[in-house]
Amino acid sequence: MQVFVSFRTAFEEAEKDKNGIEVSHGEDGVDFDVVDVVEAAAGVQTHVVIKNNVPQSKIQVKEVRLASATEHIALSPFTASVQGVNMTVANGREFRVIIAFRHSNHGKYEDRLEVFFEDLSIRQQFAIVRPLTIIVGNKSDYEELRPKAPYVPRKKTARDDPESIVPGVPPLATSTTRWVTKLPFADIPEKLSKILNSGNLPSEVASGIRKIRLPDRLDAESYPRHFQELLWIEEFKMQHDLQLYDMHGVPLAQHGVYYHLEVPGLAENRPSVLVGDQILVQRVGGSEKGRWFEGHVHFVRQASVGLRFHESFRGHSVSHKYNVRFKLNRIPLRREHEALSSAFNPERILFPKPGQVLLPTAPSPNVILPHIINPLIAENAPQLQAVASICALPAGSAPFIVFGPPGTGKTVTIVEAILQVLRTNPKAKVIACAPSNSAADLVASRLRNLGPDKLFRLYAPSRGKDQVDTSLHDFACISPDGHFAVPSLIRLKSYRVVISTCVSASVMHGVGIPRGHFTHIFVDEAGQATEPEIMVSIKMLSNNATNIVLSGDPKQLGPIIRSDVARVLLFEKSFIERLMDSPTYNELKGHGKSVVKLLKNFRSHPSILEFPNSQFYRNELQACGDRGVTHSYIGSRHLKNKTFPILFHAVSGVDQREASSPSFFNIAETTLIKKYVESLKNDSSVCITDNDIGIIAPYHAQCQKIRKSLNAVADEVKVGSVEEFQGQERRVILISTVRSSKQYIEYDLKHTLGFVANPRRFNVAVTRAQALLVIVGDPTVLGLDPLWRTFLNFVWNHGGWKGDAPSWDTDQIIRSRGGFAEDIVEETIVDMTAFIYRMRSMTLEDVMPQLPDDDGGNEDRPWREIE
């Protein structure tokens, strides 16, 4: 925008010393650097020195002021004053302006000193400005956490395709299963790769793919082709992203037949490496540039992996360095393609219509009530109805959905439903799936009373025993060499319940379990899986009589999709969300017949539940948690309002990056999070451990900085992204929102708040807390989003605010369409324009480009007749 260019030009000109006047702090302005909170609260000051270097000239200071006095800036903690009453700047005499700052809140504060002069001999006015900056915080924290190296974006280098790859030695664990079917390769079509490589904007690429490659409409017939295309698009991006972890010139450590490779970020799955994966290595300076050796991963440790190469990988020396490439493990993708290619595409599962719901009315729970195992469900009408409906489903029904908002016990409901299905139907066989191993383990742990003869937990061979709770080892098949395996087909068929991840359910088909063996397929946390993942069990194991039960919450996080193109094409929309968008799954009309919405929240204090309840769940949720937990911080010294267990701490920090990582961190927020953790742990009135506290941040770099700051304070506190906390709860949740940039408003909305202000991520983040929710963030950035602004108003109006007050009217009705970013841009333009004209009036006209609204006087010029 031209006005920004004009402002920058005017500002650069105004910063220059001129007409013989020299103003100190000309390099970086007046920068107080980092000042401790106590010192800042007491007040700090410095002075700006003005000198006249021209003998005999007569220069007078006409005005000294701060930009905050005339622009859209909140009441500034800076002040500017002059010493004495003589405003003449004589040659050889210093004129001093005292800059003082006094404020007790953490964060970065900025203003601008504007000094206006007049040369009395020629009656000419001019101005010189200096920016003012201070950071209020803990000096030692800033020193420890500041960037270790300036941010330099990674250079994208094109990979040369290997001319030859020498196969490695696979681990025994991946070759012990006897498969009766072979997975398709399902490589990305070359034409699709060319489209994805075009370099166009994601929306343009998606539009082209929609026209050229996707079916005109999505139905049972076109379903396989549609989702195979989306799966290939996502795979293309996954392969591209994996290249970011390539390593150059790194050592290998030989230990017998294994070569140990250190992998930075391995503990955080950046990248994710499993047993059986393949990693390519090539010796730097080797004679054959196109030749690579394939190393199979035999074990994974905290920071390294163990590889085995072909016997021709000889001559290794500790001085040798290697280039390393990570290969995408395509097995899960091939399993999904296999499922999509299946000819089993029943409309009653994929696109159910009201007529395919076989329960004419919601069955009475009274029949099943005397047999309920979990007494809490007997007292919970929605849970009881869900169990009764699932047990009463006729064979071949449309999928049944258990809609479970946060803390309502959807997994408990699913577990009870499985047990009741087994009781009411002696021939029932159940496979229960979940998108993640942790979610599948949770279901398995709650079904342990079935015993190892009836319950089997299927683990992929790539999963290590040390990654699984020992209490579940008896329910798995472990080979003599200590790896997870698959029992014989006869043994597999004997289990009444099998539990696996969604993708690993393919193993059952691969070893020969016939279609229809399972009478029921349950999928817990179904909202977190892509449709192809869900379909692995449904399309490979069910027949026309199999009943499908999905549990999840489409208002919470969907599947993680890396490809912008795939997101544009709605690959992020889960199967359960797509079904619930249809009339068949109307929460009211379909209650008890196709869907049940759970209503009792057993997790959070009523005030913590209030806002998400009103925004996402029509105020239907009821707070039913244990008051001994949910009310444990009422009256606490940590609260601003002693009856309101939510605290928003406003802080304007600095967005920073370091080295080659594009991820952002904010030291001001990190220090505040650390301060809260220390205060909570030192509070003897509420006894909590590290495991009672969870810290959520949207950026990986911020998570790392917070973990580092807590090393000597609270090592066991979990710090992670919103995705890592879905399905979990903590007595105390602290959220660091990170971003404080005011420079690029639209960029913040698109790239930053697109993450933070995603309604589902917001919903998950604020509903993890049981008793205390603390959010640290910059309200001027968060408030650009209507949902966040509404939430911030909610906190402010309930007295839960700490730090600088909101810059907007908290009683004003929030525009649902947003537009707050545009408002700030307009305010910024007004401020910039005012500054430009102030400088222009000081004889800067000649250096100023035209403003957007300035037509250069063309309105007064007649039109030139060309003919």
Image (cartoon, rainbow, N blue to C red):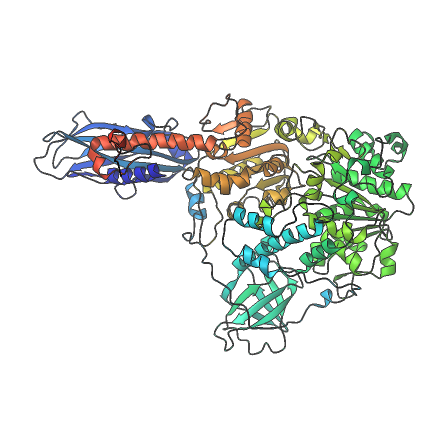
Query: Residue lying farthest right?
Result: 426
Q: Is residue 241 left or right of residue 106?
A: right
On the image, the x and y values in percent for residue 796 come to 52, 25
- Looking at the image, which is closer to me, 437 or 253? 437
- Looking at the image, which is closer to me, 750 or 772? 750
Location of the N terminus (image quadrant): top left
Specify the quadrant of the image occupied by residue 139.
top left
On the image, the x and y values in percent for residue 474 come to 81, 55
Can residue 711 be seen in the rendering of this structure? no
Query: Residue lying farthest front?
Result: 867
- Looking at the image, which is closer to me, 622 or 318? 622
Q: Is residue 246 left or right of residue 825?
A: right
- Looking at the image, which is closer to me, 395 or 683? 395
Can residue 282 be seen in the rendering of this structure? yes
On the image, the x and y values in percent for residue 772 come to 61, 32
Specify the quadrant of the image occupied by residue 293.
bottom right
